Amino acid sequence: MSDKKISRLRRAKKTRYKIRELGVDRLSINRTPRHIYAQIISADGSKVLATASTLDKDLRAGATGNVEAAGKVGAMIAERAKAAGITKVAFDRSGFKYHGRVKALADAARENGLEF
């Protein structure tokens, strides 16, 4: 693995440890050059409660690797979380910088009712 990826995973591990101490559901994201994925994982880490990504049929039609698509994923994950009865989560950015697509997803999720 590259040094860049090792550093990102180290940051992610620290964040996940802190979230586990809090004992709340977490909104975990993963970012690739083409797509962005979001999952809400239970507090104990055993279940995925809601999921959304640019691979969903609704979002595949347009560009999937840009800020607009990330915003749509954020809105979609917030709607699915509400449907599952989840309003409060901890944001797990998986070691990625809070910038660009990650920020767009987080802002859209907040605007659509998720609290973190």
Image: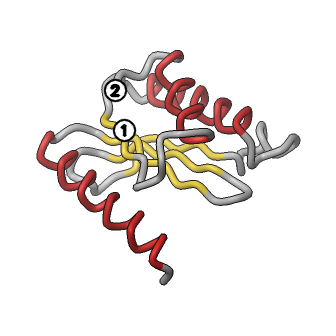
From the image, tell me which residue sits under label 2.
116
Q: Residue at x 40, y 50 (%)?
A: 48
Q: Nearer the viewer, residue 19 or 4?
A: 4
Please state if 93 lies on the left or on the right of 38 as rendered. left
| N-term-proximal mark, 2 vs 1 | 1
What amino acid is labelled 2 in the image?
Phe
**Residue 41 appears at what percent x and percent y?**
35, 47
Q: Indicate the position of residue 115 as horizontal and vertical percent values.
A: 36, 21
Quick check: 76 left or right of 38? Answer: right
In the figure, 53 relative to 30: above or below? above
Residue located beneath label 1 in the image: 91
- Residue most extreme to the right: 61
Are the residues at dot 2 and dot 1 in contact (C-beta closer than 8 Å)?
Answer: yes
Residue under the point 48% across and 70% down: 4
Q: Work out whether residue 40 or residue 97 is closer to the camera in this orientation and state it.
A: 97
User: Which quadrant of the figure contains the C terminus?
Assistant: top left
Residue 6 lies in what quarter of the image? bottom left
Q: Position of residue 79 (x, y in %)?
A: 54, 24
Name the residue furthest bottom: 1
Residue 93: x and y in percent read: 42, 47
Residue at horizontal 52 percent and vertical 25 percent from the top: 107
